[in-house]
């Protein structure tokens, strides 16, 4: 039985239950906004500094690099197809074709400078992602459009062997 004098108490309890959810929502919104501030710059820029360590040349040979070419005609303008077969649109408005560096490492507008890149923590603060299994699953697990080839079960260890790029030995050792 809820008596009339109890209403303020009931209201307070309800508020206490609801507010963590609201706070979590606000935090998620804030995070989204932060992410949107970073812009894509395209693989060409990354390649200037990542040829020697082998990441760019080995990435270029993967299916990710050319996967935009799998799209035919209007599919190349279809947002759904582009969400997995392209990286995004650069600040200049160019469509970045294929699964480029920034699909897995995050938009690079704020972390690409040498002074920042040399410092792992600083790079991360400026938008660099250290990708993991979840990064891959955004495209390799889940809904695909009707008529799409069925996605094979995603095995991270196996797919890492062939799908990404060589890992530079220097970077491996410093971990
Ligand atoms: C001006 C040169 C330069 C450019 C441009 C550049 N990088 Fe780097 N990057 C470096 C240097 C230097 C390091 C630190 C040494 C290393 O790990 O090779 C580094 C490190 C990294 C690391 C390793 C971080 C870690 O500690 O695990 C990643 C990932 C990376 N860069 C991705 C990118 C991507 C993606 C782009 C393009 C959006 C890019 N870089 C553009 C110079 C650059
Ligand atoms: C959720 C992410 C996702 C979306 C959305 C998506 N694809 Fe794919 N697509 C993939 C993945 C992942 C593969 C690779 C599957 C594999 O490992 O064999 C692939 C493979 C393909 C292939 C090669 C198939 C083969 O026989 O090897 C074609 C062609 C293709 N997609 C076309 C499309 C078209 C057209 C659209 C839009 C109508 C689209 N995709 C939307 C993720 C996606
Ligand atoms: C399909 C996803 C994917 C793409 C595309 C990709 N990377 Fe990576 N990259 C990874 C993963 C996963 C790691 C390992 C992260 C870790 O655990 O340290 C990595 C690590 C690195 C490292 C650090 C190596 C180390 O051993 O710490 C560098 C440098 C790097 N990537 C640069 C690039 C550049 C440059 C491009 C584009 C030419 C690129 N990556 C494209 C997924 C990707
Ligand atoms: C932005 C979407 C996207 C992300 C993120 C992504 N992939 Fe892919 N991946 C694709 C698409 C699309 C293909 C299909 C390439 C083709 O054949 O056209 C593919 C193909 C591959 C293939 C070759 C196909 C096969 O079945 O052998 C491997 C391996 C692979 N990805 C591994 C990874 C790994 C590992 C990660 C995370 C570190 C990752 N991918 C992240 C979209 C993505």
Image (cartoon, rainbow, N blue to C red):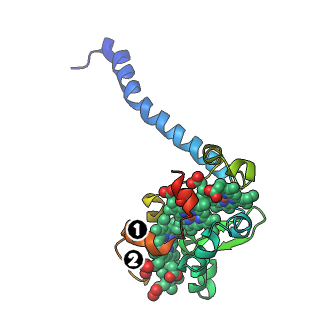
Q: Residue at x 43, y 84 (%)?
A: 147
Q: Position of residue 148 (x, y in %)?
A: 44, 82
Q: Is mark 2 within 8 Å of ligand 2?
A: yes
Q: Residues within 10 Å of mark 1 (few under 14, many from 20)?
A: few
In the picture shown, does residue 68 fall above or below 3?
below
Q: Earlier in the sequence, mark 1 or mark 2?
A: 1
**Residue identified by numbered label 1:** 141
In the picture shown, does residue 55 fall above or below 10?
below
Q: Residues within 10 Å of mark 2 (few under 14, many from 20)?
A: few
- Where does the N terminus fall, quadrant-wise? top left
**SS category of the residue bearing label 2:** loop
Q: Nearer the viewer, residue 156 or 136?
A: 156
Mark 1 touches mark 2? (CB < 8 Å): yes
Q: Nearer the viewer, residue 9 or 36?
A: 36
**Label ID, residue 151:** 2
Please state if 81 lies on the left or on the right of 8 as rendered.
right
Quadrant of residue 106 within the rendered picture: bottom right
Query: Which residue sits furthest right?
Result: 92
In the picture shown, does residue 151 fall above or below 131?
below
């Amino acid at each position: 039985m809820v008596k009339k004098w109890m209403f303020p108490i009931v209201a307070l309890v309800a508020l206490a239950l609801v507010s963590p959810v609201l706070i979590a929502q606000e935090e998620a919104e804030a995070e989204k906004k932060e992410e949107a501030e970073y812009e894509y710059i395209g693989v060409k820029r990354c390649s200037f500094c990542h040829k020697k360590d082998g990441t760019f040349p080995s990435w270029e040979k993967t299916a990710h690099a050319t996967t935009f070419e799998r799209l035919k005609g209007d599919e190349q303008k279809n947002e759904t197809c582009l969400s997995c077969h392209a990286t995004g649109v650069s600040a200049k408005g160019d469509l970045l074709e294929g699964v480029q560096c920034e699909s897995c490492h995050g938009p690079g507008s704020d972390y690409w400078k040498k002074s920042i890149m040399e410092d792992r923590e600083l790079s991360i603060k400026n938008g660099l992602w250290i990708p993991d299994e979840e990064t891959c699953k955004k495209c390799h697990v889940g809904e695909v459009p009707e008529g799409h080839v069925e996605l094979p079960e995603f095995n991270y260890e196996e797919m890492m062997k062939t799908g990404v790029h060589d890992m530079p030995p220097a970077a491996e050792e410093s971990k």
